[in-house]
Image (spheres, grey):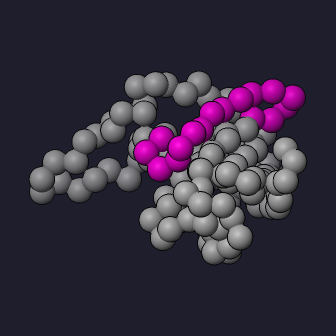
Amino acid sequence: MRDSKSIKISIASRLDCVCLVVLAVRGICSSLPLDREQAIDLEQAVCEAVNNAIEHAHVNDRSLPVEIEFQVQPDCICIHIFDHGLPFRPDPKAIQDPVPPRPGCPIPERGRGLYIISRTMDEWFYSNGQGRKVLTLKKFFTRPPV
């Protein structure tokens, strides 16, 4: 990955630590050629992915870290979310909105993570190996980074 810049952070598997990741995403996005909507999409997808690692992979085991690596490449940003917990098998059906909004009904807060990630990222994929799992999110730039 020539011409890439990267930063890695690690947080405890605690939902109250996700705000640190949000601050990192916002800071990184401020220097990228993303419009406001794209930056919000990126923030939302990364939050969903980190929350899922904490709640589902680590089953709220605070002793396991969640590691996030941001790689800025010439045409995109790649975010790798590493966990050391339970693997999962992404279900293509989960990419569909599991509970489509209905007039007068609140949108459910749970069960929409992969749907949100698939709607906000240009590409995403999951791999399992070497004792840790990684969810990779990719967002392409509309113009070259500064």
Residue 140 appears anywhere in the view: yes
Residue 24 appears anywhere in the view: no
When asked about the image quadrant of residue 37, the answer is bottom left
Residue beneath the point at 74% across and 28% down: 128
- Residue 29 lies in the magenta-colored region: no
Q: Is residue 29 left or right of residue 7?
A: left
Residue beneath the point at 85% across and 31% down: 131
Question: 73 or 124, which lies in front?
Answer: 73
Residue stretch rendered in magenta on the structure:
118-133
Residue that protrudes farthest toward the front in the picture: 143
Question: 6 or 48, which lies in front?
Answer: 6
* Residue 54, placed above or below residue 124: below
Pinpoint residue 58: horizontal percent, then vertical percent: 69, 43
Q: Is residue 1 left or right of residue 38?
A: right
Pinpoint residue 102: horizontal percent, then vertical percent: 16, 48
Residue beneath the point at 84% across and 44% down: 1
Residue that protrudes farthest toward the left in the picture: 103
Pinpoint residue 16: horizontal percent, then vertical percent: 63, 67
